[in-house]
Amino acid sequence: MGELPVSAIIVDPVTKKVVSACINHTKKNPILHAEINAILKALKLTNLERLDKFDIYCSLEPCPMCTSAISISRIRRVYFCLEDKKSGGFINGPKLIYSKNLHHKPKFYYGFKENVFLNLMKNFFKKKRN
């Protein structure tokens, strides 16, 4: 069975240009989530040490590891389509975004295009069970 269909896109909100677009590669390495891949690629392509002028769009609520990486890289805003009630790190799970220990707290928005990604996830798990 393939990777969980999670994607992340980092965008320059001024130019509307996509800086990086990535998917999960956790079959090769368990920490290569879409968000981590997108952040690493954006840092390399922009030659910056922080992404404070960029936004990230994710198909699924970032996990605690990715939430921390988003904070550390200083991404400005986070948009995600679906909540991850089991493994989320923003509004579910440890809710790291509200932790006093998280130094940078990006603005975040969720719930857009929810039905599209919900159907994608349902189909993925349906195929996995069969």
Image (spheres, rainbow, N blue to C red):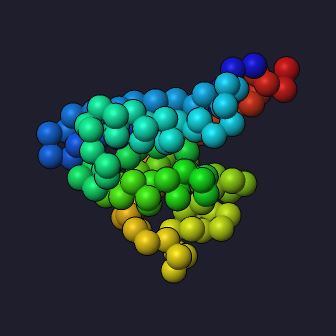
Drawn side of residue 121 relative to residue 52, left or right: right
**Left or right: where does residue 35 sit relative to residue 14?**
right
The answer to whether 80 is drawn above or below residue 71 in the figure is above
**Residue drawn at (23%, 52%) of the image:** 53
Decide which of 47, 14 is in the foreground and name it. 47
Q: Residue at x 14, y 39 (%)?
A: 15
Instruction: Please determine whether, in this image, residue 113 is positioned above or below residue 111.
Output: above
Counting from the top left corner in percent of width and height, residue 12 is at 23, 43
Q: Quadrant of residue 42?
A: top left
> Measured along the vertical axis of the image, is residue 60 above or below residue 5?
below
Residue at the extreme left of the image, as rendered: 15
Query: In this rendering, does residue 116 appear at all?
Result: no
Residue drawn where x is 69% and y is 53% of the image: 87
* Picture quadrant of residue 77: bottom left
- The residue that appears at 65% across and 68% down in the rendered structure is 94
Looking at the rendered image, the quarter that the N terminus falls into is top right
Is residue 27 visible from the viewing direction of this image? yes
